[in-house]
Image: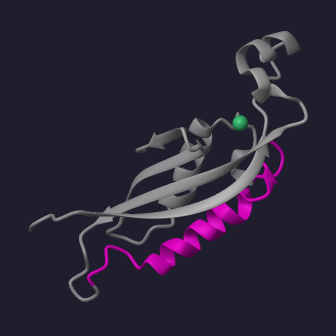
Amino acid sequence: MSEKLVYVTRRVHFNGAHKLYNPKWSEEKNEEVFGKCANKNWHGHNFDLFVTVKGCPNPDTGFVMDLKKLKIILQEKVVSKLDHSNFNLDVDFLKDVMPSIENIAMKIWEEIAIELPSGVQLHSVKLYETENQYVEYFG
Ligand code: NI
């Protein structure tokens, strides 16, 4: 069987607040390690998330995956939970997680991977915190 994988990406956007703060450390150490990101009154970002799935195009549809379905998964599992939220306080799947973009990307992976139809694999989760800074997770 030939395996001709195609990679398909959808972008979504959300904004939210967080702070990076390790309660095991003193105020001074938190400030030293996290700088402004430890600001106790939070700070926000406009996040862009790129989710890439891979698979073989279905011979009947030509699709790797119905992108309407991917759109719904991302909306329900990610955007509706993160958009206009405080990541330290409001998001079920980030409970007790230091909300760095590294950790958020890994948690988003867990939320999405189990929702994909059979034959479709998650390839990457790429999360931009600023236009100059992003992380990428491959599971
Ligand atoms: Ni930040």
Q: Mark yes or no: residue 97 visible.
A: no
Image spot of residue 13 (x, y percent): 62, 60
The coloring applied to the image is one colour
Outermost residue to the bottom = 60
Q: Measured along the vertical axis of the image, is residue 29 above or below residue 74?
A: above
Q: Mark yes or no: residue 49 visible.
A: yes
Closer to the camera in the image, 114 or 68 = 68
Give the quarter of the image for residue 19.
top right
Give the quarter of the image for residue 139.
top left
Count of numbered marks: 0
Image spot of residue 130 (x, y percent): 61, 42
Give the quarter of the image for residue 95.
top right
Which residue appears at 84% of the width and 46% of the height? 89
Q: Measured along the vertical axis of the image, is residue 63 above or below residue 81?
A: below
Outermost residue to the right = 41
The question of residue 137 being in magenta is answered with no
Outermost residue to the front = 131
Which residue appears at 89% of the width and 30% of the height? 40
Which residue appears at 25% of the width and 75% of the height? 57
Image spot of residue 71 (x, y percent): 54, 73
Residue 118 in the figure: left or right of residue 95: left
Quadrant containing the N terminus in the rendered view: bottom left
Query: In the rendered structure, which segment of residues is drawn in magenta?
Result: 62-91
The question of residue 82 being in magenta is answered with yes
Residue 53 in the figure: left or right of residue 49: left
Which residue appears at 66% of the width and 63% of the height? 79
Image spot of residue 18 (x, y percent): 78, 40
Residue 47 in the figure: left or right of residue 109: right
Answer with the quadrant where ligand 1 appears in the image.
top right
